[in-house]
């Protein structure tokens, strides 16, 4: 079984109950082949606690993670890798059309396809499962 990959971020927000400032903790994790996220906070002023989670990370949380950690890049480690297979994996995983898959494959092959580390590692694992040597890392 492959190891989990995660990124966390801390930030301040307003309590939904009393309006006091609270510290929030967000995480995106790749575990057991699935991307998940959650955010937790507890207000020290009124005790209101919040925990939310889901599959696709909310854009605001994703942007916070990218700003704090920087983007990770998806790289194909074999320049002769089958572009059709790469496109097939990207279409299936990203839910994009053929033109989008072609553009994304070009970005992957040029080393210009980036996102959070859990997102890029998820795609790298899918590519490796399709016999395309791939890695996710930060430049």
Image (spheres, rainbow, N blue to C red):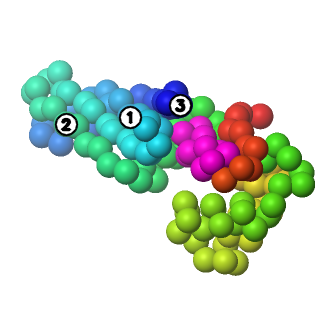
Residue occupying image coordinates x 63% and y 62% = 90
Badge 2 or badge 3: first in the primary sequence: 3
Can the viewer see residue 74? Answer: no
Checking the image for residue 26, the label placed there is 1
Measured in 3D between alpha carbons, the distance from the residue under mark 2 to the one under mark 1, in whole angstroms, is: 12 Å
Work out whether mark 2 precedes mark 1 in sequence or the reverse, and give the earlier one: 1
Query: What range of the chain is rendered magenta?
Result: 115-129
- Helix, strand or loop for disc 2: strand
Left or right placement of residue 30 versus residue 47 in this view: right
Residue 107 position, x and y percent, is 77, 59
Give yes or no for residue 125 being in the magenta stretch: yes
Mark closer to the chain start, 3 or 1: 3
Query: Percent position (x, y) of residue 118?
Result: 54, 39
Q: CA distance from mark 3 to mark 1?
A: 22 Å
Dot 3 crowding, Cα within 10 Å, few <14, some 14–19, many 20+: few
Q: Is the C-beta separation of discs 2 and 1 under 8 Å?
A: no
Circle 3 residue: 2
Q: Residue at x 46, y 53 (%)?
A: 59
The answer to which of 44 and 74 lies nearer the viewer is: 74
User: CA separation, marks 2 and 3?
Assistant: 30 Å
Which of discs 3 and 1 lies nearer the camera? The answer is 3
Please report contact status of discs 2 and 3: CB closer than 8 Å, yes or no. no
> Between 21 and 69, which is closer to the camera in this rendering?
69
Q: Which SS class for mark 3?
A: loop
Q: Is residue 80 shown left or right of residue 128?
A: right
Mark 2 = which residue?
50
- Give percent across and percent down for residue 29: 45, 36
Residue 119 visible in image: yes
């Amino acid at each position: 079984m492959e190891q989990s990959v995660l990124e966390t971020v801390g930030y301040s927000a307003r309590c939904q109950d009393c309006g006091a400032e609270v510290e929030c903790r967000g995480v995106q994790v790749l575990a057991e082949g699935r991307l998940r996220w959650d955010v937790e906070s507890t207000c020290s002023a009124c005790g209101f606690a919040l925990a939310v989670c889901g599959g696709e990370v909310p854009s605001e949380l994703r942007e916070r993670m990218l700003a704090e950690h920087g983007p990770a890049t998806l790289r194909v480690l074999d320049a002769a890798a089958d572009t059709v297979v790469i496109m097939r994996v990207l279409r299936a995983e990203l839910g994009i059309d053929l033109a989008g898959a072609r553009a994304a494959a070009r970005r992957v092959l040029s080393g210009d396809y980036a996102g959070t580390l859990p997102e890029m590692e998820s795609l790298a694992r899918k590519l490796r499962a399709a016999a395309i040597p791939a890695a996710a890392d930060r430049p």
